[in-house]
Image (cartoon, grey):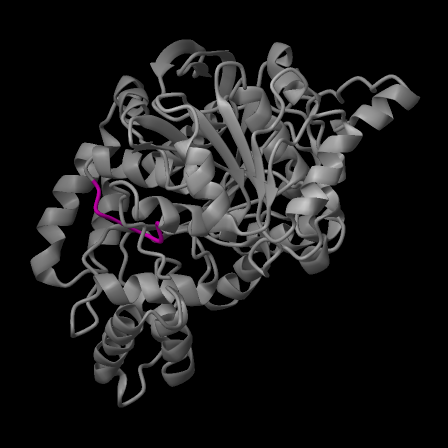
């Protein structure tokens, strides 16, 4: 019987399991042709037909599973880790569309497995929504967990941030190999206390000089709060905790990183200062995976889990990966490109249009800081569908005063008037408000030809904007369905 990476037996397959991939692939084909069901629908069907499919399929992976979760940066950091591991020679399975529920992972698996259910990969790197990560670890215990941060996000789903931290604590407690934690986020750093005794804990962090660029939720202050009282000083990092990877300097598409006492200067193709810190997180987890295969005996033990015909190829890839230098890891980081909607630039009739996903106060604040509005047209699109979070009160925790000088050229989405009201309270002019997203996007993109354009949008608004732009320009298929 195939063994799971944790050493526990993979679940026994039902007699009809041979048909599960065919059923799932058929549902996936039908949903894409008919534009019904969305990207996660095939996974929902398979979860009901064959509940053990997820765990049984991932049990084939000799290097196991990397689980990435947290409030901000999951999709981009998952992409970083996946692309770096691939660049360094491993075969990687991931869920690249941001469909970060368990059924979304199942749907992504259906695209990759053979008709017989075989998954030709060495390791999985999976983005999981904070709540669904708990359901995932009840089925699959990850070998590695990367826990990024805890911010106020979708309060109607998660409640206050201490509840989100409790959800992530269950991920840390279920991880069998290495848990990688954000040293600067006190709620994440505290999860070291629940890491199992047989697992390692490592941290990524910031130099003290950079902490003002990356405030925690407790550091957040709006215009009104600053008017009422001076902002409190950032809390000190966890005493005595050494960061395996530390971000020490930021620049225009450049990051300085301290690793093993040596400072490395890396180009980064991703947009936004916040992604430089995500880069430190990604490097830390890649180093954790690398450490687990440095011992040749560990590679042989993991190869033994594979069918004989796959062992030699895996051993060669694992040995190459294990021997990669830190310089090679940093070079791999420099090749990572943006995930869809996360600083993605689409050329529309000669105007570069930049899509910037925003879904909580920290994400919006860092996006505004990373993309100066001068010389650009600005649009904000706010929806309140389930995937966005129904409660839009978090917009009042964002400081929009950086838009004073330029104003906002267009506001759209289901909650366009709420957004316009929020801008009014910060004294920011909103020159056009239109809840019809397609009309608003077309008008916005058509203004001032050749001028760079920033579109800040919530998740479902971003999908809709990409779809609209796809009728006007060449837009890569993100594979997320309609």
Query: Residue at position x 71%, y 45% from top?
Result: 418
Question: Residue 434 lies in magenta, yes or no?
Answer: no
> In the current view of this chain or complex, which residue is farthest to the right?
228
The percent coordinates of residue 223 (x first, y second) are 80, 24
The magenta stretch is: 90-96
Asked whether 398 or 375 is in front, the reply is 375
Residue 236 percent coordinates (x, y): 73, 20
- Residue drawn at (52%, 12%) of the image: 248
Towards the viewer: 237 or 442 = 442
Q: Is residue 94 magenta?
A: yes
Q: From what the image shows, is residue 335 above or below residue 199?
A: above
Residue 205, how many percent across, how many down?
A: 56, 24
111 shown above or below 180: below
Residue 37 in view of the camera:
yes
Front-most of 345 and 192?
A: 345
Give the residue furthest to the bottom: 15
Report whether residue 144 is seen.
no
């Amino acid at each position: 019987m195939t063994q799971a990476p944790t050493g526990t037996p993979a679940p026994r397959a039902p007699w009809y399991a041979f048909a599960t991939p065919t059923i799932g692939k058929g549902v996936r084909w039908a949903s894409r042709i008919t534009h019904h069901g969305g990207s996660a629908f095939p996974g929902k069907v398979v979860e009901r037909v064959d509940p053990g499919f997820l765990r049984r399929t991932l049990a084939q992976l000799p290097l196991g599973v990397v689980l990435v979760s947290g409030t901000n940066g999951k999709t981009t950091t998952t992409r970083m880790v996946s692309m770096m591991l691939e660049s360094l020679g491993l075969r990687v399975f991931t869920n690249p569309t941001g469909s970060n529920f368990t059924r979304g992972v199942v749907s992504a698996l259906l695209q990759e497995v053979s008709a017989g259910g075989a998954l030709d990969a060495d390791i999985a790197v999976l983005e999981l929504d904070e709540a669904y990560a708990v359901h995932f670890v009840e089925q699959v215990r990850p070998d590695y967990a990367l826990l990024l941060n805890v911010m106020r996000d979708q309060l109607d789903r998660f409640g206050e941030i201490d509840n989100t931290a409790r959800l992530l604590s269950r991920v840390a407690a279920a991880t069998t190999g290495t848990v990688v934690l954000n040293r600067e986020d006190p709620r994440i750093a505290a999860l070291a206390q629940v890491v199992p005794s047989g697992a390692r804990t490592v941290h990524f962090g910031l130099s003290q000089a950079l902490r003002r660029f990356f405030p925690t939720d407790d550091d957040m202050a709006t215009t009104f709060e600053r008017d009422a009282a001076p902002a409190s000083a950032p809390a000190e990092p966890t005493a005595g905790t050494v960061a395996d990877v530390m971000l020490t300097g930021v620049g225009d598409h450049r990051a300085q990183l301290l690793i093993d006492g040596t400072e490395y200067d890396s180009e980064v193709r991703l947009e936004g200062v916040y992604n430089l810190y995500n880069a430190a997180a990604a490097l830390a987890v890649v180093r954790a995976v690398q450490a687990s295969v440095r011992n040749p005996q560990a590679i042989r033990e993991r190869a033994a889990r594979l069918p004989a015909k796959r062992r030699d190829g895996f051993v060669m890839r694992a040995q190459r990966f294990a021997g990669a230098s830190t310089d090679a890891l940093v070079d791999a980081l420099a090749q990572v490109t943006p995930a869809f909607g996360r600083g993605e630039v689409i050329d529309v009739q000669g105007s570069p249009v930049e899509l910037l996903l925003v879904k909580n106060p920290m994400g919006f604040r860092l996006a505004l800081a990373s993309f100066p509005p001068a010389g650009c047209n600005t649009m904000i699109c706010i929806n309140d569908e389930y995937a966005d979070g129904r409660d839009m009160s978090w917009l009042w925790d964002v400081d929009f005063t950086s838009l004073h000088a330029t104003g906002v050229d267009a506001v759209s989405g289901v909650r366009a008037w709420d957004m316009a009201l929020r801008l009014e309270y910060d004294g920011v002019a909103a020159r056009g408000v239109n809840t019809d997203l397609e009309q608003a996007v077309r008008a916005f993109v058509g203004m001032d030809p050749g001028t760079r354009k920033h579109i800040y949008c919530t998740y479902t608004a971003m999908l809709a904007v990409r779809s609209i732009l796809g009728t006007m320009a060449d837009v890569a298929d993100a594979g997320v369905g309609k």
